[in-house]
Image: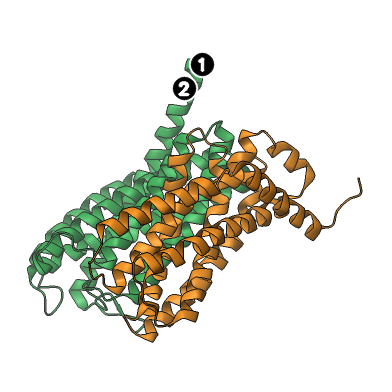
Amino acid sequence: MRDLDFLKIFLGILFIAVIVLSFVTGKPVRGYGDEFRIFYYHVPCAIVSFIAFLVNLIYSMKYLRSRYYLDDMKAASAAEIGIVFGVLATLTGAIFAKITWGTYWNWDIRQTSIVVLLAVYGAYFALRTAVEPEERRSAFSAVYAILAFIAVPTFGFVVPRLYDSLHPKDTLVSGGKIALGGTVAVVFFGSLIAFTILFFWLFNLRWRTGLLERSRMEKSYE
Amino acid sequence: MSELTWPAKLIALVVKDFRVELRTRYSLNALIMFALVTLFALGVTFTGQNLTFRIHAALIWIMIYFAGLQGLSGGFVKEEESRTAMALRLYAPSSVIFFGKLIFSLLILTILVVFLFPLYYILMNLEITRIWIMLLVLILGIFGLSATSTITAAMVSKANVKGALFAVLSFPLMLPLLLVAISATTVCLGGGDSQALWDSLKIMIAYPVIVTAVSFLLFDYVWNN
């Protein structure tokens, strides 16, 4: 990890730059006021939670092939962090909703979707606590993670298109092209990169602590 | 004993499950009583109320869903409880088990809906404008609920806590289906437009097929573990 130290410093500088720039640059999107600045945090959180669930899927599939406990541990770690970022996306979304629509929560299809997604991964952890022994738990949770990922695109992309939503559309991608202008795009993608690096750092820390917990457990059995 | 062919084994498994079900009423009694109690509660609560199409649609599917939750895990749980799972594992390949249990769930849910839907129709003064499409929506819904519950039931049967876990695991997988089933039913009862109906029907066909395919591919990992 030593050689990755420069990344941590880079991440610190990037986050400071994003936080400062997100407040001092012009209003991001026409038609909305300063409250729209939250999208610099809200959208990256949502994207990162999607990335986390994708990482969970990849390691789950890998586990079923390899049957190696570390893959299962990595899958669970990714899901945990995905839930954290999903909750952050929900909270920032609720703040935005309060300012623009007047209520924190109004069962907009986007809000419903993200809650269901969080419920999927909540169920994933419920399954993990209910099944023994370890090999069976790992295999079942990998199977459930793969099944759950059918719900991720359904709720992330299909269902929100079918219902009327108050959620802003076409701000990010419009007609297959990126719709953000100059500085807004720079700050947004800076933020997205920062959150993505943060995710992989947290992910790395989480499965390594998981490994330590495991070896301590094994020692206590001896 | 001579070796049976794949379809013969499948039929044998379904017939066996059905015979055991008729003898013990492991799933059906609880299922039907649950549906009756719910229907009774709804009927008492909503007497003389004029419910919108959407509320009717939501009530119908919530009832089917929760009644289904009582019985759908039975197919696998009873194999584990009576310790016959191992014999079944020796007797048939996992594909037979998967589709056998899927067909059994289909039968159980069909009995439930055949019983429940007409009763709801009579007791709640339901009016249906598109009766044939309503029938199609019910069939697709039954198929979807059975498809999503088969593999979760197999997992739950080997877990420490069964009942609650089955609901927790199935809910997120069934919810996309329930949402579109409710909007399709709303249209069938007379609200909404046909474009919404068509969109919902597309998902109601595609989603269970995808779930069935994926769970079939993954079933070995659950069944032989």
Quarter of the image with the C terminus of chain B is top right
User: Hue of chain A?
Assistant: green
User: Can the viewer see residue A87?
Assistant: yes
Q: Nearer the viewer, residue A213 or A16?
A: A213
Which quadrant holds residue A115?
Answer: bottom left
Dots 2 and 1 on the same chain? yes
Q: Which mark is residue A217?
A: 2
Q: Amino acid at mark 2?
A: Met
The numbered mark at residue B82 is none
**In the image, farthest residue toward the right:** B2
Quarter of the image with the N terminus of chain B is: top right
The residue tagged 1 is: A221
**Secondary structure under badge 2?**
helix
Question: Can residue A153 be spotted in the picture?
Answer: no
Instruction: Look at the picture and state if A188 lies above or below A51.
Output: below
The span from disc 2 to disc 1 (Cα, nearest Å) is 7 Å
Q: How many marks?
A: 2
The answer to whether B119 is drawn above or below residue B29 in the figure is below
Q: Chain of mark 1?
A: A
Asked whether disc 2 touches disc 1, contact meaning CB atoms under 8 Å apart, the reply is yes
Rendering quarter of residue A208: top left
